[in-house]
Structure formats: structure tokens, C-alpha cells
Amino acid sequence: MENRIRILLLSLAVLATGCSHMPWRKDKAEAEPPPPPEGGSTPVVIEPQVERREVKPARIDTENWEAGAYIGSLSVEDFEVNMVYGARLAYHISEDFFAEAIAGTSDAGLSSFERLSGGAPLLTDSERQFTYYSLGFGWNALPGEIFLGGKHAYNSAVYLTLGAGGTRFAGDDHFTLTAGAGARVLLKDWLAVHLDMRDHVMEIDVLGSNKTSHNYEASLGVTAFF
Amino acid sequence: MARLAACGLLIFLASIATARAEGLSVTVADPYVEMRTGPGRGFPVFNVVERGASVEVESRRTDWFKVKDVRGREGWVHKDQMKETLVPAGVKMPIDDPAREDFGAHRREVGLLLGDYGGASVVTVYGAWAFNEHLAAEVAASHILGDFSDGQYLTIGLTHVPVPEWRIQPFLSIGTGVIRIQPDGTLVGTPERTDQVAYAGVGVRAYLARRFIVRGEYKEYVVFTDRDENEEDIEWKIGFAFFF
């Protein structure tokens, strides 16, 4: 019984395959290539309606700039230690290096010569103002984290800076090299506290002869990344 | 009524806040991406996000992207891993960072140069904007700091790069500007003066890495004084610049 059904199904299958190859089949004719169009131009069969998605570089908020202000004390060589105020702008080029611009101002005090001699002051009040700027680069030498108790961790970096610029003091502009080291602690990802030590080195001739003057500065600053 | 308005304002502010917080959402296509505690290679990896999961990109600092995963953890992922993530359109995240191929074809350049102007130290900041690969307009502000006089000069000029395809590119420059010279306070009797200057120069700029350029140049200046003879000065400078 089973065999008979099998034979029947098989013969049906053979018949169907055979029929599909018969010349009277309609779809056989359709499968033939269409005759070449007159005039030689290819007719437009399908109008492609593909809307290409334009992929632009994503607009991501980059925060490589850092700007802020600092306050500290500046020791103007021979002219006492005084309060200094300044502003700082930095551009972070890579995780290791940044470009930095700083500008600050301070009012220098009296030299010991002026104090002891009791005579006329060497400088006028406006000449006594010590104003500097410096442009240079910094290297994040020791990046890391600092921990406050068990719950708080803040990203930090100890960096070294080297810059060149000018200082207006004692009625003249002096070419100044500024070398420094600082520590940056990020309280938030956009907010940093800086502790900086800098030495402003220049040639100066206020007290008669030319000499190299080192002017050390220690400051505390706050900057924001944007 | 006032309460209603306050409510509306609150909702409005909240919507701004949420809109601001929504960044670009990308899908991880690599086996995983590593999230670090800070934007640097030394910071520890504290979380990994597996393939198929999505993260929200919040901001970028240098080569690091600050991302937030679905569980709200925030960390920093390196550019090399971010490049392999997929944006909603289904393609890799496009990050257009300048590279060697862009040097020479770049539009803007900013730099700092140090050197010597007629025997005095000079500090220069310049910015350039390129019309095409060969020709650029340049504005430079300089500060001369000498033993006997100080001064500033501001110039505008053109630079021409004959072969912008090279890694080390020589260039020619011409320009004009104004110069102000102040004799030192300790010297008496010489007045401050402001004159026009013109310069011609040659220089070389070379691609360092990423977007950095090292640049050196030599220029000859003519200062159009109101005395009988014009003053000629020689300047050379070297420094760094970056393009964008």
C-alpha cells in the first residue's frame, strides 16, 4: 500500500518536472531577453528611490580649552614679596601636552636700598608695577588620581611648563623666560584647581648694573574647561 | 496663575536640561570597549561595555571621549575604540581628526615663534588663513625686547608654499605693517617712534605629528623712517604651530 502511494507521488513529481520544460509553457517565453529598444537608448525600468543617509562627523562637545584666574604671591627680586593676580588660558593638544598663555600683575615693594638709605625712591609708582605675560607649553608629567577618604577620587596631574614672554617693570619691557611646575586637581570634569610655582627669569638693570633677576611666584588658581 | 507659570517654567527648564544631557548614542561593535576613570592612558579601566550595548557620548577631551553606559556609569574611552563603534545610521562613528594628509591642505594655523630681531629678543604670535593650498594670509603680532629698546610690531602678509604635498615645506613670505619702538627708560633723549615696515622672507614648516607643525623663518625688514635713511633689520625665528 505504502509503496503504491510512493510510486504515485514519484510519477507525479516526474510529470511535473517534465511539464516545466515543455515549450508551450508561458513563463518560458517571458524569460527571453526583451528585444533591443529602437533608437539605441536604454529605457528607464526602475527609478531608484534610495535616500542615502548622510553621515556627518558627530557634533560632540569638545572640552580642550581651559580658562581661569589665579591669585598668589610674587617675590620680585630686591623688591619684596607681594600679592599677584593673573589669568590663564590653556589649550590641551593631547593628553600629555598643552599650550598655555598666562598674564599677571603685581605691585612691587621697596628695595632694601630704598628702605635703608631713606632717600628718593628708585622707581615711580607706575614703574613699580610688575606686569608679565608668558606663552609656552606644558607637559603633564605625572597624571594620576588623588583620593579623599574612601569615597572620593579626583583626577589630577603634576605638570611642568616652559614659556617665553615679556615683563614690564621699572619702566622697561624685559624678555622673560618662565619655568614652572604645577599641580592640577579636577573637582569636576570641567572644574580644576591649580597650585603653581613659577620662576620668571629676566635681565634687569635697575640697581646700576645688568643682572639676571629671578622672580618666584606661588599661586592658587581655578579654571574651567570648555 | 503664577503657580501655573512657575510650573511651566520648571517643565521648560527640565526639558532643556534633559535635551542638553542627551548626547550621541553609539553601539559597540568591537568585542568590548574599555571605560577608564580619567582621560589618559594611565587611568585604570573600571568598566567594560560589550558588543551590542550602546553608550551615550557626552563630551570629548583630546583623544578621549566621556561616555555613559545604560547603567549610568560614566567613564572615558579612547578615540581608537570609539572609531569602531556604530552610529544610529549603522556606520562607524566618523571622527575627523587632522593627520599627515591634512597638512598642506589645512585652512587655519596658529603658532608661537621666538627669535631675534635686529639683535633683540622677539616673541611672535601669528595666525594664518589659507585661500588655497599654496597661498595664505597671515597676521602676526610681535614683541621686541632688547637691551636698549623695546617695541611691538603688527604685520599682515602673504605666504606662498610651492609644494604643499611635502612633509617639509619651504615657503616665501612678503608683507607690511607698523612698528613702534620705545627706547629704554634708562636712555634719555630718544623719542618713541612709530613707522611703517615691509618684509620679505623665507621659511620652512614641517609636520611633526597630529596637528603640530614646527616652523622656522628668516625675514628682512625695511623700516620706513622719517630720517634720511631707511632702517634695515634682519629677523629669524623658530617655533611651534598647530593647524585646524
Image (tube, rainbow, N blue to C red):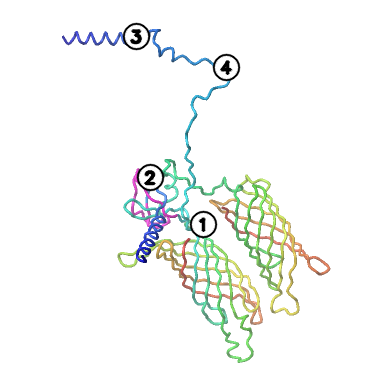
User: Of the residues tagged 4 and 3, which is closer to the observer?
Assistant: 4
Task: From the image, state whether disc 1 or disc 4 is nearer to you.
Answer: 4
The local secondary structure at tag 2 comes to: loop
* Whether label 2 touches label 3, CB < 8 Å: no
* Residue at the outermost left position: A1
In the picture of the structure, the residue carrying the numbered disc 3 is: A19
- Residue type at mark 1: give it: Ile
Q: Is residue B44 left or right of residue A113?
A: left
Disc 1 versus disc 3: distance between alpha carbons? 76 Å
Per the rendered image, the range of residues in magenta is: B35-59
Q: CA distance from mark 2 to mark 1?
A: 27 Å
Q: Chain ID for label 2?
A: B
Which residue appears at 49% of the width and 41% of the height?
A54
Q: Earlier in the sequence, mark 4 or mark 3?
A: 3
Quadrant assignment, res A16: top left
Residues tagged 1 and 3 counted as in contact (Cβ below 8 A): no
What is the chain identity of the residue bearing mark 3? A
The mark nearer the N terminus, 1 or 4, is: 4
Check if residue B53 falls in the magenta segment: yes
Mark linked to residue A38: 4
Q: Which mark is residue B28?
A: 2
Q: Secondary structure at mark 3?
A: helix
Label 3: how many Cα within 10 Å (few below 14, some 14–19, many 20+): few
Image x and y of residue B117, in percent: 69, 65
- Local packing at callout 2 (Cα closer than 10 Å; few below 14, some 14-19, many 20+) is many
Question: In the rendering, which numbered label is found on residue A93?
Answer: 1
For image coordinates 26% across by 10% down, the residue present is: A10
